[in-house]
Image (cartoon, rainbow, N blue to C red):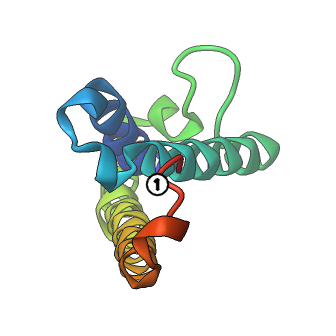
Amino acid sequence: MACFAAPAALGVFAFAFRKSFPERWHIGWLNTMILGATVALGIDHAASGEIVPYPPFLSAMANPADAAAMAGEIISVGIPMAIGLVLAWVLMVVIHEKLLAALPSASRQESY
């Protein structure tokens, strides 16, 4: 239903505060991963009719009784997806830093 809302909220936060992060953290990588995940999930949900082009936009919001199920899905699926994205990004940054540190200083490319 609305599991993409948690990664989308994380994306808004990461994009809004992107200049607050050190360059070596490659926050652009996280923003790209979040954008890709949110767009893919949005397309999937639109294809299955869970997102509609008219208000209330989320088909689960048409029936107020379904709001609890939607919130439960955001908590049980959306938040773990957002955490997974962040963990994958952290792993990418750590591996990148370790590989960069292993290179001799003359052959490093700091243009990443």
Q: Mark 1: give few (<14), some (14-19) or many (20+) Cα within 10 Å.
A: many
Q: SS class of the residue under badge 1?
A: loop
- The residue lying toward the viewer, choosing from 27 and 66, is 27
> Residue placed at 69% from the left, 27% from the top?
52
Confirm whether residue 68 shows in the render: no
Identify whether 91 is placed above or below 44.
Answer: below
Judge left or right: residue 49 versus residue 34.
right
Residue type (three-letter) at the residue carrying disc 1: Cys
Task: State the image coordinates of residue 30 (x, y, percent, origin top left).
Answer: 44, 51
Quadrant of the rendered structure where residue 69 is?
bottom left
Tell whether 66 sits left or right of 40: left
Query: Is 19 in front, or is 48?
Result: 19
Which residue is situated farthest in the top direction here? Answer: 54
Residue 80: x and y in percent read 35, 71
Looking at the image, which residue is at 22% across and 41% down? Answer: 21
Residue 83: image x %, image y %? 32, 67
The number of discs equals: 1
The single residue placed furthest to the front in the displayed view is 106
Q: What residue is disc 1 on?
A: 3
Q: Residue at x 54, y 57 (%)?
A: 109
Pick the front one: 72 or 30: 30
Q: Is residue 65 above or below residue 76?
A: above
Q: Is residue 83 visible?
A: yes
Q: Residue shown at 18%/32% (left/top)?
A: 20
Q: Position of residue 31 (x, y in %)?
A: 46, 43
Residue reaching furthest to the right: 47
14 to 62, vertically: above or below: below
Which of the 4 quarters of the picture holds residue 104? Answer: bottom left
